[in-house]
Image (tube, helix red, strand yellow):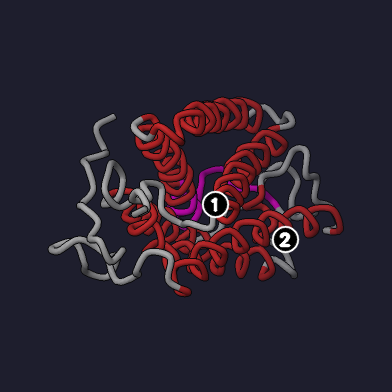
Amino acid sequence: MSLLPAGGDVRAGGGPAPGRRGALGLVRANSPAHWALLVTGLAGSVLFNLTWFIDGLIRSGYDPVVQPVSALSLGPVGWVQVANFAVFGAVGVITAPAWRPTLAGGTGAVWYPRVAVLAGAATIGAAVFSQDPALGYPPGAIAPLHPSAHAQVHNVVAYISLIATIAQLVILARRFRREPRWRGWAAAALVTACLMVGFLAAFGILISHGGPGGTFEKLASLSATVFGISLISRLIARRDARISAPPQAG
């Protein structure tokens, strides 16, 4: 997987490197905007998971064990999950620039924000294009014999979003492996990526047989969220949003 060219150098002032600005290089390291974007991204991920979890518990006829999250986009109150996809995707795109100064000076500084934008844009696509009725949901709806065009687009963008999320974890694992103070996190990122792959494989197999595929899809989403909470919490505890913090003068 050679997605990961080295990022640009970080200047002493903490800003993005020359030639690396653009839309994704406008945030200065440890500025209020930097911290606000990181925390907003984390909050968006937590809110996304809380929304589908609560909606799935109270939605009449929805089986969270069997049904995927996307099924919540259907029915009279499907707008709740549609909005959830749209907001989560928009938050991912808007907060992507925060990762340029966080990862500045090494692997992933350029590609991680770009992949984050891809994941966010694909999630917005999942809001625009919904899946077809399936596996008895919505109640009384007849599943089509062949997938509709909008359902096929939904499946494509959903997989793009999930693959992009896994790629982000792999990028972080490569970067952490090169950072003496973060090497333990390289294994955590890689394990999380492997868990997502395993959960999504189980989801794909079980969903086609009416099994508990929805459970494994949700576990994939939650595993990435738990890793994100842990990472941002570590940055907050260090009071430095940069992975490669320069040595202090003294």
Left or right of residue 129: residue 11 = left
Question: How much space separates mark 1 and mark 2, taking CA atoms?
Answer: 30 Å
Other-residue count near label 1 (Cα within 10 Å), few / some / many at <14 / 14–19 / ≥20: few
Q: What label sits on residue 171 in the rendered view?
A: none
- The residue located at (48%, 56%) in the rendering is 240
Provide residue 161's location: percent of width, then percent of height. 45, 49
Name the one closer to the observer, 45 or 61. Answer: 45
Provide residue 246's location: percent of width, then percent of height. 33, 50
- The residue located at (29%, 50%) in the rendering is 109
Q: Amino acid at mark 2?
A: Thr
- The residue indicated by pointer 1 is 238
Q: Amino acid at mark 1?
A: Arg
Number of labelled discs?
2
Q: Can you tell which of label 1 and label 2 is closer to the viewer?
A: 1
Provide residue 199's location: percent of width, then percent of height. 60, 30
- The residue located at (66%, 57%) in the rendering is 46
Q: What label sits on residue 51 in the rendered view?
A: 2
Residue range of the region highlighted in magenta in the rendering: 142-155
Other-residue count near label 2 (Cα within 10 Å), few / some / many at <14 / 14–19 / ≥20: some
Name the one closer to the observer, 178 or 145. Answer: 178
Provide residue 91's location: percent of width, then percent of height. 50, 67
Left or right of residue 133: residue 228 = left
Q: Are marks 1 and 2 in contact (CB under 8 Å)?
A: no
Q: Quick one: label 1 or label 2, which is nearer the N terminus?
A: 2
> Quick check: 208 above or below 141?
above
